[in-house]
Image (cartoon, rainbow, N blue to C red):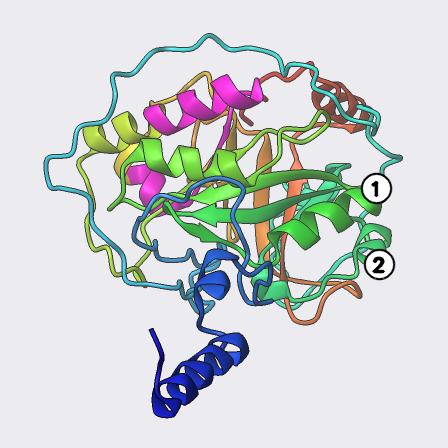
Amino acid sequence: MRLSGVVIFSIASLCLAGCTSTSGVDALQVPSSETTSSVVRPPAPVASVGAADAEPDFAPEEAAEQTVAMATPEPAESIEPPVEPIALVAPKRLARAAPMLAEPVQRYRFRDAKPINFGKAASPRRLAVHGVDVSRWQGNVNWAKLRAQGANFAYIKATDGGDHLDPMFRKNWRNADAAGLKRGAYHFFYWCRTAGEQADWFIRNVPRVEGALPPVIDVEWNGESSCKRQPSRQKVLEKMQVFMDKLERHYGQRPIIYTAPDFYRDNLRGAFLDYPFWLRAVAQHPSKVYPGRKWVFWQYSGSGLSHGVRGRIDLNVFHGDERAWRNWVGGRQMVAEAE
């Protein structure tokens, strides 16, 4: 069958267009291997959860940290998984290259913008092992200088709520260890989220390594928070227990409870007697603020000064002498006696 010249010319034009187009069938069937630099593929699927409010980094006078999205409150009648009591255990040995024993203890050389006279007998300077806690608000920390100033340990802000990771956590975690400080991570607890999902978020972001200090749950009332809920004492203790049990199973260490005077008065007096405590007391000795409570760490200042950071930093001290510290970080952890 003979085709006219017009038809032949049309067919030829279509064939030429198909050879030069990037929208042909072949182009659709061959996926591009390119990815944009702004896309980071997570190692595992991320659950869609609301952001928690950031904590005030243990100092109410500091600005509260902002998160990436509005908080999503948990249902009013949310039910936590049943609580399974866990016996006090020594930390399990986990694979890690660094030794368990602490580095030589550096003596106290910090200054304080607002020094408090606790009395000669009650002065934190009488105790041998001092340290700091940090978060994004300290910026880029010079860990070598901080160590030389007398920081033997550091608690590093890791997470809060169910989806917020401190942007400086990973860098601080690596560099504190490289400088010879014993390091641990803390989580700021958010009362409008379930305890289980908060524990999962912490576990996902904080490595399980031998030699790390026990994880910390920071429980306090945060007036800056969009979550205005203040659960009953019973509910507070239930949520804390769920969170701590999950961390203890994962890390093989009993978590430490950090708290402040008002929250302790409302919820924690007489509770968790077999758990180690880290107490904030910046005006009086812990024995005056938390009578009868055993403690391992005392946060005695929120206005410390060091060559390793710009601005102020929280100062802490371990409850014991150098020998007790070495035993404690070596895995023979016991709840310190109250004074």
Q: Distance between the Cα atoms at labels 2 and 1?
A: 11 Å
Report the magenta stretch's main SS.
helix
Task: Mark yes or no: residue 226 visible.
Answer: yes
Lateral position of residue 218 relative to residue 19, left or right: left
Q: Residue at x 61, y 12 (%)?
A: 90
**Whole-percent x, y for residue 62 in the image:** 47, 67
Q: Amino acid at mark 2?
A: Lys
Which segment is the magenta one?
242-265
Task: Relative to 91, say whether 23 is above or below.
Answer: below
What residue did someone put label 1 on?
Answer: 180
Q: Quadrant of the N terminus?
A: bottom left
Q: How many marks?
A: 2
Q: Amino acid at mark 1?
A: Gly
**Whole-percent x, y for residue 130 in the image:** 72, 43
**Is 119 a magenta residue?**
no
| N-terminal label among 2 and 1 | 2
Lateral position of residue 151 relative to residue 40, left or right: right
| Disc marking residue 145 | 2
Mark 1: give few (<14), some (14-19) or many (20+) Cα within 10 Å.
Answer: some
Task: Relative to 187, say whether 166 is above or below.
Answer: below
Task: Mark yes or no: residue 123 visible.
Answer: no
Q: Quadrant of the C terminus?
A: top right
Query: Residue reaching furthest bottom?
Result: 6
**Whole-percent x, y for residue 240 in the image:** 34, 30
Look at the numbered disc 2 and give the secondary structure of its residue.
helix
Query: Residue reaching furthest front?
Result: 1
